[in-house]
Image: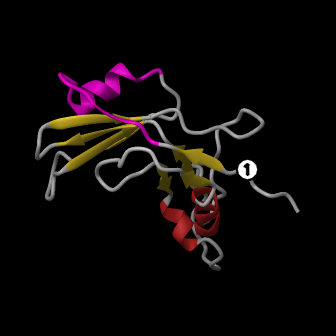
């Protein structure tokens, strides 16, 4: 049986002065791979936003992608091992960021669902250790790598 590769992550946290807002930062980083923004500037509570890029890659050089199941998500997340370092803000210390398709909730059910004409993947995401945390309450931005 193949033992999955483990990824040790020792976060380095740096406060960024004069950083742009999350949308402007997203625009500046638009050429980075796997760019994702979880924007918490609207609604309540509006404390944090998280902008991540460059998900971890496997031994074959391809981005690590979760298997299209909840079990696959857990298995992928278990491959990232925190190894000390700085305490990351906002209760996110690197990890899995993913989008789940609505139909994933019906996986394994005997339902007559309409065909997905766009062939939307059931799950998209990866393991991230490079990200920015925007604290809207304190008006601070930190970078973690």
Q: Residues within 10 Å of mark 1 (few under 14, many from 20)?
A: few
Task: Spot the residue most to the bottom.
Answer: 110
| 93, 23: nearer the viewer | 93
Label 1 secondary element: loop
Q: Position of residue 30 (x, y in %)?
A: 41, 23
Q: In the rendered view, tell whether residue 10 sits above or below residue 43.
A: above
Q: Position of residue 8 (x, y in %)?
A: 59, 47
Q: Quadrant of the N terminus?
A: bottom right
Point 70% across, 35% down: residue: 62
Point 29% across, 48% down: residue: 89
Point 33% across, 23% down: residue: 27
Using the rendered image of the protein, determine whether residue 72 is visible from the camera's viewpoint. yes
Picture quadrant of residue 104: bottom right
Using the rendered image of the protein, determine whether residue 118 is visible from the camera's viewpoint. no
Q: In the rendered view, tell whether residue 142 sits above or below residue 24.
A: below
Rendered image coloring scheme: secondary structure
Q: Which residue is mark 1?
A: 5
Q: Position of residue 116 (x, y in %)?
A: 58, 54
Relative side of 45 to 96, left or right:
left
Relative side of 12 to 138, left or right:
right
Q: Which residues are magenta?
A: 11-31
Is residue 18 one of those drawn in magenta? Answer: yes
Point 55% across, 47% down: residue: 127
Is residue 52 one of those drawn in magenta? Answer: no
């Amino acid at each position: 049986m193949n033992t999955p590769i483990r990824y040790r992550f020792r976060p380095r946290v740096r406060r960024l002065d004069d950083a742009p807002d999350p949308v402007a930062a997203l625009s500046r980083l638009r050429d980075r791979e796997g760019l994702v923004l979880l924007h918490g500037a609207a609604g309540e509570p509006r404390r944090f936003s998280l902008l991540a890029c460059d998900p971890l890659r496997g031994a074959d050089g391809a981005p690590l992608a979760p298997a299209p199941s909840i079990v696959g998500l857990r298995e992928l997340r278990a491959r990232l091992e925190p190894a000390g370092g700085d305490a990351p803000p906002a209760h996110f210390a690197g990890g899995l960021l993913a989008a789940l398709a609505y139909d994933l909730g019906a996986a394994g059910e005997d339902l007559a669902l309409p065909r997905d004409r766009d062939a939307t993947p059931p799950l998209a995401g990866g393991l991230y250790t490079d990200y920015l945390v925007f604290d809207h309450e304190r008006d601070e931005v930190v970078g973690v790598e």
